[in-house]
Amino acid sequence: MTPERSRTRAAGVAYAAAAYLTWGVFPLYFRALRGVPAPEVLAHRITWSAAFLLVVVTALRRWGAVIRLLSAPRTLAALGASATFISVNWLVYIWAVNAGHVLEASLGYFVNPIVTVLLGVVFLREPLGRRQRTAVALAAAGVLVMVVRAGRVPWIALALALTFGLYGLVRKRVRADAVDGLLVEVGLLAPLALAFQAVLAARGASHFGASARFTALLAASGVVTAMPLIWFANAVSRLRLSTVGILQYLNPTAQLAIAVFVFGEPFTATHAVAFGLIWSALALYTQAVLRPSVAA
């Protein structure tokens, strides 16, 4: 490996680690907003992200690319769909953190790679090798354990995995830079978010301005949302996707640790069996990605 290539790879790993670890500590950020309803937090996350990205796009002189996205009806419709998926994902996640379900939320992001594989099979007709089929079966068994032993469907985990998987599927089929595409997505959602905030303010129910802590945290949500995505885009441009895929487990691992050791959520025998099956699935999935030449 040449020195230049080595530096590029090191920078890519640093960007990816920064993105995934930031996402991994999101529970701490959103728990600090406990007391603010999830829809209000989501509305601020959308509007402040739009404001921050307007500054970024202007600084990078990327308005030409943004206008091209806005001028293509099919692209705009696709970004409208991806905006819907990611907003539902954000809403469920914010609610889960403040309702004390961080452990289940982390499960969703552990399951997400397997869901992504299945979406690729269904919508992109991607072939599924033997090891990948086994990984899917193990992950399904892990979810089934949660259903049978806990007596309920882990809907938070499944909702997060499915909405983020569908978001990735749509964005994979849209030729748009991460920053440009995200600006269009939050721009499409911003009018609704602003209208919702206006209604809350008119009713005297807005938490923005109610305290210095809530105001600062809500205003910071734009930077908190956009920066990891920018880092992620920089990582993808410098690393093999297989490397990025392995590093992504930093996110749910950090969330799991925070849920158990910081928030004190119980990690039961059922969780141990379910997570064990899913971690086995991820190990098999990772091996299939790293060594595709091995018989599948």
Image (cartoon, rainbow, N blue to C red):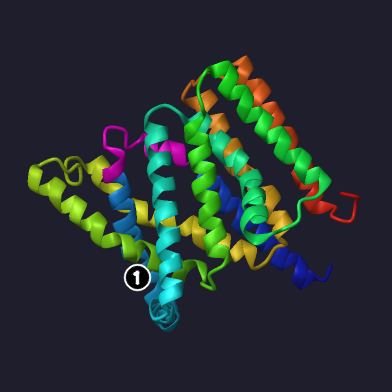
Disc 1 marks which residue? 54
- The chief SS type of the magenta part is helix
Q: Position of residue 255 (x, y in %)?
A: 54, 35
Left or right, residue 93 beside residue 149 = left
Q: Quadrant of residue 114?
A: top right
Asked which secondary structure carries label 1, the reply is: helix
Q: How many marks are shown on the rendered structure? A: 1
The residue located at (36%, 62%) in the rendering is: 186
Q: Is residue 94 visible?
A: yes
Q: Please indicate whether residue 2 sits to the left or right of residue 202 in the image.
A: right
Q: Is residue 39 magenta?
A: yes
Quadrant containing the N terminus is bottom right
Lateral position of residue 240 relative to residue 93, left or right: right
Task: Answer with left or right where residue 173 lies relative to residue 286.
Answer: left
Farthest bottom residue?
Answer: 64
In this rendering, the answer to whether 147 lies above or below 281 is: above
Q: Residue 276 placed where, x, y %?
A: 70, 27
31 magenta-colored: yes
- In the rendered image, is residue 182 in sight? no
The image shows residue 120, relative to residue 156, as above or below, that is below
The span picked out in magenta is: 26-40
Identity of the residue drawn at 61% across and 36% down: 253
Residue at (46% x, 66% y) in the render: 78
Rendering coords of residue 70 (x, y %): 38, 77
Task: Find residue 260 and report its image quarter.
Answer: top right
Image x and y of residue 232, in percent: 57, 59
Q: Residues within 10 Å of mark 1 (few under 14, many from 20)?
A: some
Give, as a three-letter code, the residue at label 1. Answer: Leu
Please tell me which residue lies in front, 97 or 191: 191
